[in-house]
Image: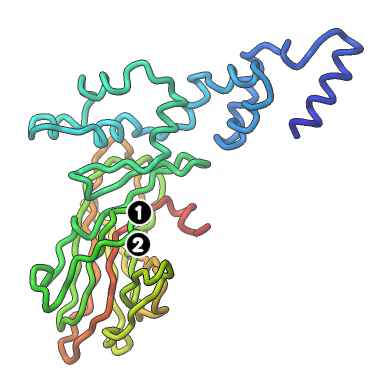
């Protein structure tokens, strides 16, 4: 594309004495505003005019989610409870950290994984759409029996965003619960549990998966569900399968109508039939994605 445009520019310049660099940056910026972020970044490499136009704040302001100020506050390190309470509002602490940054730089920062809440949660923007995505570590979840090593173990691993997972050896009552309070842009979202049957590790540089403890998941399905403070409820039932591969099990969908309000979500995964034990399960995290991105995945 760049080659074709440069050729056309050369021909045009020979006839009319004008070059692509002569196009006003404001005009280029108006065109770039209709493209998605990866396309804007590619065109920014064409020449100085496109590079300058691609940094216009009005372009990236429209690409950022409506709650980006709230997100910036959440990923800013907070020292005490008073600062934590102020995360719903614009704080001077956050203003100092991001003061002077162009909207393009803010978009780039938020497109990377950003830890918050004592590094137990992570938020990022989808680079193409600007959609808000969240991941919640197993450390932030309430897990029945987690403190008894006969049932659960914490295992370090590179296969998790949080560098650790919870591994279930064996238990009668499987129950994992969690909750989140967050401001989401308006739209529909899907919540998933990221699970794997088996315990993966590396041996001589190669990935292996120990499946010796896997049992009990084919007797009854696991119920994944969510509820919101405004009365929404959804659930899915799954028989766990596919040993050795991380799988996203849908817990449900929810809709955000008012992006200015905090949304409280409670979610859980349960298999509480005590007629049999179950085990051999790796629990990594809970993931929340815009529904449009979840479908693509």
Residue 212: quadrant of the picture: bottom left
Which residue matches tag 1? 288
Say which residue appears at 47% left-offset and 26% top-offset.
104
Q: Image height check: is 24 above or below 35? A: above
Residue 117: quadrant of the picture: top left
Tell which circle, 1 or 2, labels the residue nearer the N-terminal end: 2
Kindly give the residue lying farthest to the bottom in the view shown: 275
Determine crowd level at label 1: few under 14, some 14-19, many 20+ residues with C-alpha closer than 10 A.
many
Q: Which of 39 and 191 is in front in this view?
A: 39
Disc 1/disc 2 C-alpha distance (Å): 6 Å
Which residue matches tag 2? 192
Mark 1 touches mark 2? (CB < 8 Å): yes
Say which residue appears at 16% left-offset and 81% top-offset.
171
Identify the colour scheme used: rainbow
Quadrant where the image shows the N terminus = top right
Rendering coords of residue 29 (x, y %): 61, 20
Determine crowd level at label 2: few under 14, some 14-19, many 20+ residues with C-alpha closer than 10 A.
many
Q: Image height check: is 126 above or below 31? A: below
Residue 28: quadrant of the picture: top right
Kindly give the residue lying farthest to the top in the view shown: 17
Say which residue appears at 19% left-offset and 65% top-offset.
154
Say which residue appears at 78% left-offset and 31% top-offset.
3
Total labels: the figure holds 2
Compared across the picture, whether 130 is left or right of 237 comes to: right
Judged from the image, the secondary structure of the residue bearing numbered disc 2 is: strand
Judged from the image, the secondary structure of the residue bearing numbered disc 1 is: strand
Q: Nearer the viewer, residue 113 or 95?
A: 113
Rendering coords of residue 160 (x, y %): 33, 58
Q: Image height check: is 175 above or below 62? A: below
Kindly give the residue lying farthest to the front in the view shown: 204
Compared across the picture, whether 268 is left or right of 65 comes to: left
Rendering coords of residue 158 (x, y %): 34, 59
């Amino acid at each position: 594309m760049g080659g074709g445009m440069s050729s056309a520019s050369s021909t045009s310049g020979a006839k009319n004495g004008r070059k692509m660099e002569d196009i006003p940056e404001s005009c280029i910026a108006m065109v770039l505003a209709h493209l998605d972020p990866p396309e804007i970044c590619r065109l920014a490499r064409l020449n100085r005019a496109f590079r300058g136009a691609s940094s216009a704040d009005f372009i990236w302001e429209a690409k950022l989610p409506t709650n980006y100020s709230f997100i910036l506050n959440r990923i800013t390190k907070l020292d005490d409870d008073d600062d934590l309470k102020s995360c719903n509002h614009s704080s001077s602490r956050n203003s100092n950290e991001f003061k002077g940054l162009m909207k393009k730089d803010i978009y780039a920062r938020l497109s990377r994984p950003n830890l918050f809440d004592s590094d137990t949660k992570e938020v990022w923007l989808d680079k193409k759409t600007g959609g808000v995505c969240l991941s919640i570590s197993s450390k932030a979840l309430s897990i029945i029996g987690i403190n008894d090593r006969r049932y659960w173990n914490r295992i370090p691993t590179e296969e998790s965003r949080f560098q650790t997972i919870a591994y279930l050896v064996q238990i009668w009552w499987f129950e994992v619960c969690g909750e989140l309070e967050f401001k989401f842009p308006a739209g529909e979202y899907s919540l998933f549990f990221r699970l794997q049957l088996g315990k993966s590790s590396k041996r001589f540089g190669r990935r292996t998966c120990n499946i010796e403890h896997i049992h009990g998941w084919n007797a009854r399905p696991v119920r994944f569900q969510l509820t919101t403070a405004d009365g929404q409820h959804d659930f899915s039932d799954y028989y766990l399968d596919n040993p050795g591969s991380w799988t996203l099990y849908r817990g449900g969908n929810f809709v955000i109508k008012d992006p200015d309000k905090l949304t409280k979500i409670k979610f859980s995964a349960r298999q509480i039939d005590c007629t049999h034990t179950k085990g051999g399960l790796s629990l990594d995290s809970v993931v929340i994605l815009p529904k449009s991105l979840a479908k693509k995945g």
